Image (tube, rainbow, N blue to C red):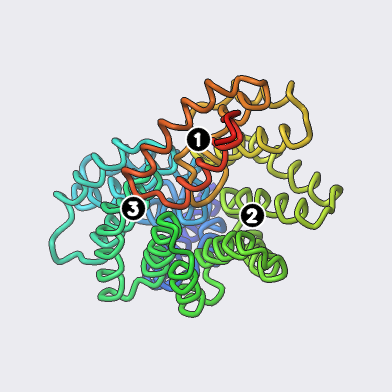
């Protein structure tokens, strides 16, 4: 019995030493985007070793967040909170992580509140953590269509990331600055910025998003070969990182691309992959609803009114499947037009056109006007 206890203590000591080594490396690896490798290391640790070490837990939670494993990360953050009540030095980092998870849930006010609270706890000279909070706020503002605020926070995040050598935060800031330009209808500028992200980032997981956005831009320009090339590169990175949220976005675009080529079987396979991810509950709420909006669009394209009506009822947020105007939800209006309720659809679309014009959502404003032109029977 004593021998077993001694052996257990020795193993625990070795694992704790391994934990110290991983902690020494984790910050550099996250900055350089080597997150999948780091995540694999964390998963090798015995559960009792992980749960007894707040710093190890927190680094593991960050690795989970950055690979899109938000539900698992949330459960670890709850555990960390119980460990760190008497360790105030960890509170700022913990709340920063909680702010990231709040964003993935679509909790805008919660994200802003937590980020602002974290900023009061993080020292001024901790430029790295303040840069992470800036990127989180920038992405949050982007997701709700507040482009001016997003651009300001993203530019701050870009500057802080360059200063601290955080490649992952830098690439995230660049990608979303490109997305700001795409939202404004400036696709050439967006293309240049996204290509810059890929040039800097290589095969870092976040560059998958740059590839997907470039695929969407080339699809818009009817450059379908270039679209497929970027789509395949993006999905390869997503499969390696296991980011279900990004994979779902790729399958949405894949379905549209196969439809453009007339490949019905491949299109149906991509739609089914989106459906599986949406029904599996493995993607965050905003993108879950984005997937639902896409399924409405596909059902209507096939003339399947019954499915479209059923899926519309599941929508909890007014969003669209398109990457550059997702906060202008058009699924319900598409259904109304298909049902013959064109005047009602036209009225709703006019309200959204006004909102798009006020917010300078040029790309989404054009798309909404096109749909409104279908809803209005008066030829003039």
The residue that mark 1 highlights is 329
The residue that mark 3 highlights is 136
Per the image, label 2 sits on a secondary structure element best described as helix
Is any atom of residue 85 visible in this view? yes
Name the residue located 48 percent from the left edge and 64 percent from the top edge. 187
In the picture provided, is 93 more to the left or to the right than 100?
left
Q: Residues within 10 Å of mark 3 (few under 14, many from 20)?
A: many
Q: Residues within 10 Å of mark 2 (few under 14, many from 20)?
A: many
Per the image, label 1 sits on a secondary structure element best described as loop
Q: Is residue 113 above or below residue 311?
A: below
Labels 2, 3: front one: 2
Is any atom of residue 17 visible in this view? no
Mark closest to the chain's N terminus, 1 or 2: 2
Mark closest to the chain's N terminus, 2 or 3: 3
* Residue 305 vs residue 92, the one in the foreground: 305
Give the position of the C terminus as an image quadrant.
top right
* Residue 155 vs residue 171, the one in the foreground: 155
Name the residue located 84 percent from the left edge and 53 percent from the top edge. 263
Is the C-beta separation of discs 2 and 3 under 8 Å? no
Name the residue located 44 percent from the left edge and 64 percent from the top edge. 175
Is the C-beta separation of discs 1 and 3 under 8 Å? no
Give x and y (percent) for residue 101. 40, 43
In the picture provided, is 351 more to the left or to the right than 128?
right
Alpha carbon separation for disc pair 1 and 2: 19 Å
Q: Quadrant of residue 376?
A: top right
Mark closest to the chain's N terminus, 1 or 3: 3
Alpha carbon separation for disc pair 1 and 3: 23 Å
Q: Quadrant of residue 241?
A: bottom right
The residue that mark 2 highlights is 250
Per the image, label 3 sits on a secondary structure element best described as helix
* Residue 374 vs residue 29, the one in the foreground: 374
Alpha carbon separation for disc pair 2 and 3: 22 Å
């Amino acid at each position: 019995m004593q021998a077993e206890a001694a052996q257990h203590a020795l193993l625990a000591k070795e694992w704790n030493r391994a934990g110290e080594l991983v902690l020494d490396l984790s910050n550099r690896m996250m900055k350089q985007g080597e997150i999948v490798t780091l995540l694999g290391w964390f998963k090798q640790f015995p559960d009792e070793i992980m749960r007894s070490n707040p710093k190890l837990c927190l680094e593991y939670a960050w690795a989970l967040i950055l690979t899109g494993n938000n539900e698992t990360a949330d459960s670890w953050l709850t555990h960390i909170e119980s460990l760190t009540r008497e360790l105030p030095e960890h509170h700022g980092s913990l709340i920063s992580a909680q702010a990231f998870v709040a964003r993935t849930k679509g909790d805008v006010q919660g994200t802003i509140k937590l980020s602002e609270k974290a900023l009061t706890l993080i020292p001024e000279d901790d430029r790295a953590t303040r840069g992470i909070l800036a990127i989180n706020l920038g992405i949050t503002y982007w997701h709700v269509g507040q482009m001016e605020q997003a651009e300001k926070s993203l530019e701050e995040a870009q500057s802080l990331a360059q200063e601290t050598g955080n490649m992952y935060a830098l690439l995230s800031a660049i990608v979303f600055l490109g997305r700001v330009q795409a939202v404004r209808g400036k696709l050439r500028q967006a293309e240049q910025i996204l290509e810059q992200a890929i040039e800097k980032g290589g095969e870092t997981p976040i560059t998958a998003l740059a590839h997907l956005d470039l695929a969407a831009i080339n699809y818009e320009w009817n450059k379908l070969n270039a679209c497929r090339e970027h789509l395949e590169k993006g999905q390869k990175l997503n499969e390696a990182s296991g980011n279900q949220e990004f994979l779902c976005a790729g399958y949405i675009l894949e379905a549209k691309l196969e439809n453009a080529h007339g490949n019905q079987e491949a299109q149906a396979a991509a739609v089914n992959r989106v459906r599986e991810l949406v029904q599996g509950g493995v993607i965050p709420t905003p993108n879950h609803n984005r997937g639902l909006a896409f399924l409405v669009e596909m059902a209507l394209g096939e003339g399947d009114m019954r499915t479209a009506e059923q899926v519309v009822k599941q929508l909890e947020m007014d969003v669209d499947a398109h990457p550059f105007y997702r906060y202008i939800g058009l699924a319900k209006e598409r259904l109304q037009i298909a049902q013959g309720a064109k005047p009602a659809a036209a009225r709703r679309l006019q309200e959204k056109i006004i909102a798009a014009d006020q917010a300078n959502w040029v790309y989404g404003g054009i798309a909404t006007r096109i749909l409104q032109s279908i809803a209005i029977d008066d030829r003039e």
